[in-house]
Image: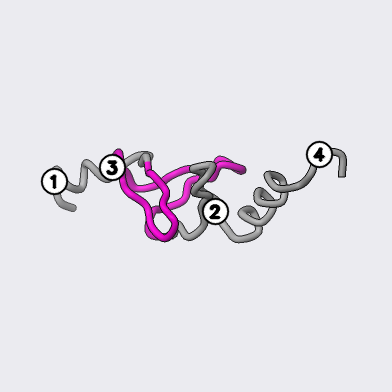
Amino acid sequence: MSDFSFDKDFQGEAILEFGDSDFIILKAGSFVRCAVTGDPIQLDQLRYWNVDEQEAYKDVQIAKQRWIELNSEPGK
């Protein structure tokens, strides 16, 4: 186990800015939370997010569910 400050910087929850094909780390951390479930997602496992909503999703099913929710017409 090391005591480097780099390791300390990448603990806890990160804050990201999501782009079309990547993200920028605004605050260092090791994970973000799924916008739907609140589950932590390790940054090296993060594959699904919404650029417009700036939300992360833990898997494809949750991403699809959220997309439907955001894009369905009210009353249908």
Q: Secondary structure at mark 3?
A: loop
What whole-number distance in Å separates the C-alpha atoms at marks 3 and 4? 38 Å
Mark toward the viewer: 3 or 1: 3
Q: Secondary structure at mark 4?
A: loop
Which residue is located at x 30 percent, y 40 percent? Answer: 26
Q: Position of residue 76 (x, y in %)?
A: 87, 45
N-terminal of the pair, mark 2 or mark 1, is 1
Mark toward the viewer: 2 or 1: 2
Which residue is located at x 61 percent, y 54 percent? Answer: 63
Query: Circle 2: is it few (<14), some (14-19), or many (20+) Cα within 10 Å?
Result: many
N-terminal of the pair, mark 4 or mark 1, is 1
Q: Position of residue 27 (x, y in %)?
A: 30, 38
The residue that mark 2 highlights is 58
The residue that mark 1 highlights is 3
The mark found on residue 74 in the picture is 4
Magenta stretch: give its range: 16-44
Q: Secondary structure at mark 1?
A: loop
N-terminal of the pair, mark 2 or mark 3, is 3
